[in-house]
């Protein structure tokens, strides 16, 4: 029963995280005025990119989007409907429209990726990095496909750092033998809140000083 519950929890969290990143990809593609196929591709890489990289590195099969192929059809329908709705309503999409779903996806994916790696009894640093890659890689691909330098690399705001600290917290809570859902939801909530605060208060990481800045 415990294994079934843990597995069901992971699937539910992956669905929420995938949906959050899919929304960020949808908005990013729409802002770039991509066609229907372009929006679908950007939405897909944002939603599934991080989790797929994690599963490749951990040799986990099948991939989430292969095992739950109906979500691809759903995502395709949502992309088409969203494009029609936003076009008819002439909605103005700003860059900030991406930030909230992206922050939610960051927290959920980082916590889930770390937890999955811990189940394979990997070292703490490896588990944490798996969480970071799960959370960050989808957004990196989204920005690359939209012909932008990935924000995770260029905006000097804490993003991967928040994912790394959240992953460490997941490992710590597991060492304390907390329930699986607490080990995921507590760090995920903290990471999401920290990311939103970082955006709101414009926190910046130390960076190289050059003549241009």
Image: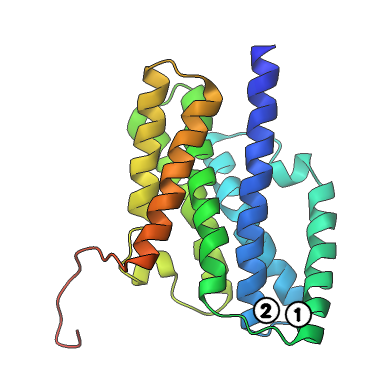
Labels 1 and 2 touching (C-beta < 8 A): yes
Picture quadrant where residue 127 is located: top left
Residue 68 on image: x %, y % = 78, 42
Q: Nearer the viewer, residue 169 or 147?
A: 169
Residue in view at x 14 percent, y 76 percent: 209
Residue in view at x 78 percent, y 59 percent: 75
Picture quadrant where residue 12 is located: top right
30 vs 109, left or right, is right
Q: Which mark is residue 12?
A: none
Q: Which mark is residue 86?
A: 1
Q: Nearer the viewer, residue 113 or 87?
A: 87
Residue 22 on image: x %, y % = 66, 60
Residue 104 shows up from this direction: yes
Of callouts 1 and 2, the N-terminal one? 2
Looking at this rendering, what residue extends furthest in the top direction? 1
Q: Nearer the viewer, residue 47 or 120?
A: 47
182 vs 44, left or right, is left
Q: Nearer the viewer, residue 163 or 93?
A: 93
Residue 38 on image: x %, y % = 71, 76
Residue 126 shows up from this direction: no
**Quarter occupied by the C terminus:** bottom left
Element type at marker 2? helix
Residue under pointer 2:
30
**Quarter occupied by the N terminus:** top right
């Amino acid at each position: 029963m415990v294994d079934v519950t843990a597995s069901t929890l992971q699937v539910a969290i992956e669905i929420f995280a995938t949906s959050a990143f899919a929304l960020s990809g949808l908005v990013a593609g729409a802002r770039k005025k991509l066609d229907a196929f372009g929006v679908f591709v950007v939405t897909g890489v944002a939603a599934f990119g991080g989790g797929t990289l994690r599963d490749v590195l951990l040799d986990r099969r099948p991939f989430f989007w292969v095992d739950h192929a109906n979500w691809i059809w759903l995502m395709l329908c949502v992309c088409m409907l969203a494009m029609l709705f936003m076009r008819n309503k002439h909605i103005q999409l700003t860059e900030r429209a991406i930030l909230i779903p992206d922050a939610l996806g960051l927290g959920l994916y980082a916590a889930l990726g770390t937890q999955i790696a811990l189940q394979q009894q990997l070292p703490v640093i490896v588990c944490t990095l798996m969480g970071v890659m799960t959370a960050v890689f989808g957004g990196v691909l989204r920005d690359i496909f939209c012909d932008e330098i990935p924000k995770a690399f260029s905006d000097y705001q804490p993003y991967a750092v928040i994912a790394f600290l959240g992953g460490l917290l997941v490992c710590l809570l597991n060492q304390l033998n907390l329930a699986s859902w607490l080990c995921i939801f507590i760090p995920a909530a903290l990471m999401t809140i920290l990311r939103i605060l970082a955006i709101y208060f414009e926190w910046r990481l130390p960076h190289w000083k050059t003549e241009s800045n």
